[in-house]
Image: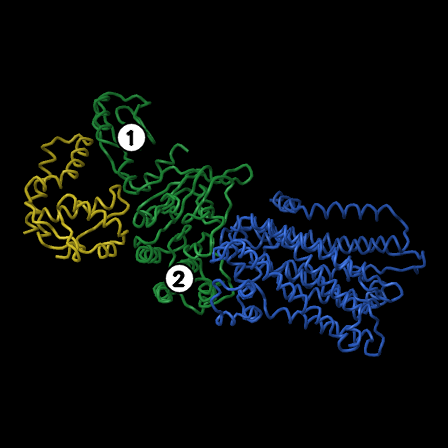
């Protein structure tokens, strides 16, 4: 049966993500092995890249193991689960703990240079930071629950914010050995707990059905039509009902022949998380308020970058990321919705209007939420030309992002495909924003109205083209 | 306009190509108003693609599909209000309660028969407060059928409607279909591979085989014309029996079992004389016919 | 006697349902279980009772009407006609079944006398039962 373990290990090479990871990691390891001494500017990116590689490996391996376990075969085939868990566990250990330790060991001493001080890396400290991130990502990949992902993202944001920097450096350089050990122990314990949960995973557990972000086609062919229904079953909790504002449906009125916007609002009853948008804003507001408090803003230390540029950037980037997660669920009911009395043109325009409305609502609430510290500490900054122009730029960019998403969505690829392209579009939008406001000498530039106009000029033809293409797209 | 153009569903030379594979390979099918048509075919014969193309959810690569005379791809709101559809894979908004989903669905239509919906839900024991996402496959199918009947459509299209129902619910469903749908005013198209359901309910049958229509006509005509002949001759029979319209033949010595497409007294008489044989005629039910037609695949 | 109850079709038989109905009703009329002047049950009643498509029942009724076995009375339905139920009609009614018996007997190489000898007691027993 030794053959069996090899077979299981080989399933990992089927994934293009794992292959890409292997190639990049091999290059990294080769580079580390060949260079003896390196200065700070060369080695620091390696530490960050290596850490990222470990974290990604955790996601890939966990999702692969889960896909193998969350399947009727794993419960019915004798001797199925244990070998899969063992192979996955060994690979996870090697690609996270093993790789991180190697990187830390090879980078133990970093010379100064280019104005940077010499730095001593304490391997357990580095490994601890990598492992806690890897554990979080592994759980994210396993649970695939939006609230959990959101919390991890929020914590992660705190982790990389300037206020956490001293703690991180203390951990990495070995000046906070207890913190490092606690972190490492926590990470390892949570990974063991994860494997234990997978050993028990069954259909009664909600996360069993959450698999669609990776290879829905494979799962659909394995489990047939029940899959989507079951993954949908994860959506029926009371919290979900509250977020959706389900009670409003009881008061819904007939919309036959109603105006475009009324029908779009009616569609939003079914497709949006109505109450979630202000909630997202409130969460961001609370988080930033806390961070800014510890950052000394209440003592009058704030700069415009933290209080204006960062909140508006959050408002630019986050809405599409959230929408990109929830909108693809829309495809499942598209066929029957398309048969409700309305022409194809009306139907598509209504869906577009409903989605555009949703994105604008997310943008509004998250921007307002993220600006809460500003409203609290520096209200007079809000009405400056800089702030207003920035808001105009991000609003225009939302239109462009929406157009790009609708254009991509026509292909109705896997969630992974859609997410990746959406992520690239969002990153590009963020880059444009940062580039426009550039902040030499702590002073923010006012985004040029020409750029704002240019964004809209690009967005509109993309939107029109997307609509035309959707008119010719199968809605099955 | 000819009558065919106004019929509930008309497909003319419809092809649907997915990459190199043709899911539909030149389908001509006219469904007359008021008929109950069973669409029969093996798995992957193209039943679902045919239905989705007819409804305008899928765009044919070639050919034309119309519903009540309108191109399926560009249906008006008024025509869509006359269609009821139960897809094979039923995905409804999982977080809605059944009563909410009904209310929401009704809000799109010009009329809604609350009495009928309530009656069906009661008969089928579907509770209004349950959430859609936790329903069993069978209950979900019942709910989808109720939703498709609520606006009293003139054309009802069901893709494998009884596949997930237990025998009792299937009986109820067929009874409902007969009461509500098969009153001669409505047209029903339903795909299935359960021939016994079809035999009770359908008056016409269309058999789809590898993306083509292998038979389209009245169910009674099909049963009257396709028969199995048991030939017993006094001398050994030739292996390649020359009989017109043979679907399947099996020859062993003096005996032969031949399935023919168009049986007639003349044909039987001809066989009797040619082979000095006695000919027994055996009736075939739909399942037998279906299997015989798919024999030399 | 309620004729709808006496009807019994097998949808999954090779004989089309409408022909099963025609044969059974024809036999009931010929055997005087349905007397002249009696009405056939409504199409809807039969369709619901047997759970079959009403159009199939209509088809069977109009065939019987064409044969002159029943006639349509406006507002009341199908009434059995006062036709002379001579022997020929009744013999025609049983002919398809006998043909099947004959074919099977030939396949089994049974002599005609053997078949008749086997059939005779059955006929007599049935006769007693009916009286």
Q: Outermost residue toward the front?
A: B1
Q: Nearer the viewer, residue C48 or A348?
A: A348
Q: Is residue A121 above or below residue C118?
A: below
Residue at (28%, 45%) from the top-left corner?
C12
Q: Secondary structure at mark 2?
A: loop
- The residue that mark 1 highlights is B257
Distance, label 1 to label 2, CA atoms, is: 49 Å
Q: Position of residue A112 (x, y in %)?
A: 93, 57
Does residue C111 appear left or right of residue A221 in this picture? Answer: left
Q: Nearer the viewer, residue A9 or C25?
A: C25
> Could you say which chain is coloured yellow in the image?
C
Q: Colour of chain B?
A: green
Q: Is residue A371 above or below residue A220?
A: below
Q: Quadrant of residue B148 in the image?
A: bottom left
Q: Check the residue under mark 2 and report the chain it is in.
A: B
Q: Colour of chain A?
A: blue
Residue at (82%, 70%) from the top-left corner?
A304
- The residue that mark 2 highlights is B150
């Amino acid at each position: 049966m030794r053959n069996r373990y090899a077979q299981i290990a080989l399933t990992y090479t089927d994934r293009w993500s794992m292959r890409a990871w292997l190639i990049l990691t091999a290059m990294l390891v080769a580079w580390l092995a060949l260079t003896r001494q390196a200065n700070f500017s060369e080695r620091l990116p390696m530490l960050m890249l290596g850490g990222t590689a470990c974290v990604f490996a955790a996601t890939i391996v966990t999702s692969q193991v889960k896909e193998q376990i969350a399947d009727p075969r794993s419960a019915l085939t004798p001797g199925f689960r244990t070998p899969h868990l063992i192979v996955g566990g060994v690979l996870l250990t090697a690609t996270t703990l093993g790789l991180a330790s190697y990187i830390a060991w090879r980078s133990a001493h970093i010379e100064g240079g280019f104005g940077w001080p010499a730095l001593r890396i304490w391997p357990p400290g580095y490994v601890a930071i990598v492992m806690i991130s890897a554990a979080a990502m592994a759980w994210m990949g396993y649970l695939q629950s939006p609230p959990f992902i959101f919390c991890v993202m929020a914590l992660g944001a705190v982790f990389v914010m300037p206020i956490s920097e001293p703690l991180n450096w203390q951990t990495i350089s070995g000046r906070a050995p207890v913190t490092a050990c606690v972190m490492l122990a926590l990470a390892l314990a949570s990974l063991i707990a994860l494997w234990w949960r997978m050993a028990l995973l069954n259909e009664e557990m909600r996360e069993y059905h959450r698999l669609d972000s990776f290879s829905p086609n494979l799962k659909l062919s394995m489990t047939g039509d029940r899959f989507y229904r079951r993954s949908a079953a994860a959506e029926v909790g009371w919290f979900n009902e509250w977020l959706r504002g389900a009670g409003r449906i009881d008061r819904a009125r007939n919309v036959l022949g109603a105006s475009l916007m009324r029908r779009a609002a009616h569609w939003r009853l079914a497709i949006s998380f109505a109450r979630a948008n202000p909630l997202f804003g409130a969460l961001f507001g609370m988080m930033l308020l806390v961070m800014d408090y510890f950052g000394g803003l209440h003592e009058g230390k704030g700069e415009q970058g933290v209080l204006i540029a960062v909140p508006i950037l959050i408002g630019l980037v986050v809405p599409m990321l959230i929408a990109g997660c929830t909108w693809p669920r829309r495809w499942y009911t598209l066929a029957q919705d398309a048969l409700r009395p309305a022409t194809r043109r009306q139907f598509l325009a209504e869906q577009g209007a409903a989605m555009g409305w949703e994105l604008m609502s997310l943008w509004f609430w998250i921007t307002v939420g993220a600006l809460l510290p500003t409203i609290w500490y520096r209200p007079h900054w809000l009405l400056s030309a800089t702030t207003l122009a920035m808001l105009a730029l991000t609003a225009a960019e939302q239109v462009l992002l929406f157009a790009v998403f609708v254009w991509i969505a026509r292909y109705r690829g896997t969630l992974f495909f859609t997410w990746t392209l959406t992520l690239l579009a969002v990153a590009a939008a963020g880059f444009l924003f940062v580039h426009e406001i550039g902040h030499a000498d702590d002073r923010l530039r006012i985004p040029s109205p020409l750029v704002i106009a240019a964004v809209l000029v690009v967005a509109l033809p993309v939107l029109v083209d997307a609509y035309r293409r959707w008119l010719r797209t199968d809605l099955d | 306009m000819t009558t065919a153009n106004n019929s509930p569903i008309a497909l003319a030379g419809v092809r649907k190509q997915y990459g190199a594979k043709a899911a539909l390979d030149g389908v001509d099918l006219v469904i007359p108003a008021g008929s109950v048509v069973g669409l029969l075919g093996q798995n992957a014969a193209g039943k679902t693609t045919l239905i989705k193309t007819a409804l305008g959810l899928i765009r044919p690569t070639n050919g034309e599909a119309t519903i009540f005379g309108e191109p399926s791809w560009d249906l008006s709101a008024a025509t869509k209000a006359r269609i009821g559809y139960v897809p094979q894979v039923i995905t409804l908004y999982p977080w809605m309660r059944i009563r909410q989903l009904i209310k929401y669905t009704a809000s799109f239509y010009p009329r809604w028969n609350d009495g009928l919906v309530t009656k069906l839900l009661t008969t089928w024991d579907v509770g209004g407060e349950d959430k859609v996402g936790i329903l069993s496959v069978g209950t979900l199918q019942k709910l989808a059928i109720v939703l498709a009947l609520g606006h009293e459509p003139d054309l009802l299209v069901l893709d494998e409607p009884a596949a997930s129902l237990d025998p009792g619910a299937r009986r109820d469903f067929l009874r409902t279909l007969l009461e509500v749908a098969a009153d001669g005013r409505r047209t029903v198209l339903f795909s299935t591979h359960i021939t016994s359901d079809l035999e009770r309910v359908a008056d016409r049958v269309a058999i789809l085989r590898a993306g083509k229509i292998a038979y389209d006509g009245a169910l009674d005509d099909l049963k009257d014309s396709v028969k199995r002949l048991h030939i017993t001759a006094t001398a050994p029979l030739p292996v390649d029996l020359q009989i017109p319209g043979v679907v399947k033949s099996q020859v062993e010595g003096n005996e032969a079992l031949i399935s023919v497409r168009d049986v007639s007294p003349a044909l039987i008489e001809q066989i009797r004389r040619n082979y000095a044989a006695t000919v027994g005629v055996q009736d075939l039910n739909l399942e037998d016919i279906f299997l015989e037609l798919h024999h030399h695949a | 006697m309620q004729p709808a109850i006496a009807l019994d079709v097998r949808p999954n038989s090779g004989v089309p349902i409408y022909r099963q109905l025609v044969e059974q009703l024809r036999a009931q009329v010929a055997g005087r279980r349905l007397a002249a002047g009696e009405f056939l049950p409504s199409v809807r009643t039969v369709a619901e009772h047997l759970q079959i498509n009403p159009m199939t029942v209509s088809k069977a009724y109009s065939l019987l009407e064409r044969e002159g076995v029943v006639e349509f009375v406006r507002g009341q339905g199908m009434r059995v006609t006062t036709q002379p139920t001579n022997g020929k009609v009744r013999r025609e009614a049983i002919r398809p079944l006998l043909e099947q018996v004959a074919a099977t007997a030939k396949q089994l190489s049974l002599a005609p006398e053997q078949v008749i000898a086997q059939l005779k007691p059955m006929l007599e027993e049935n006769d007693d039962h009916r009286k």
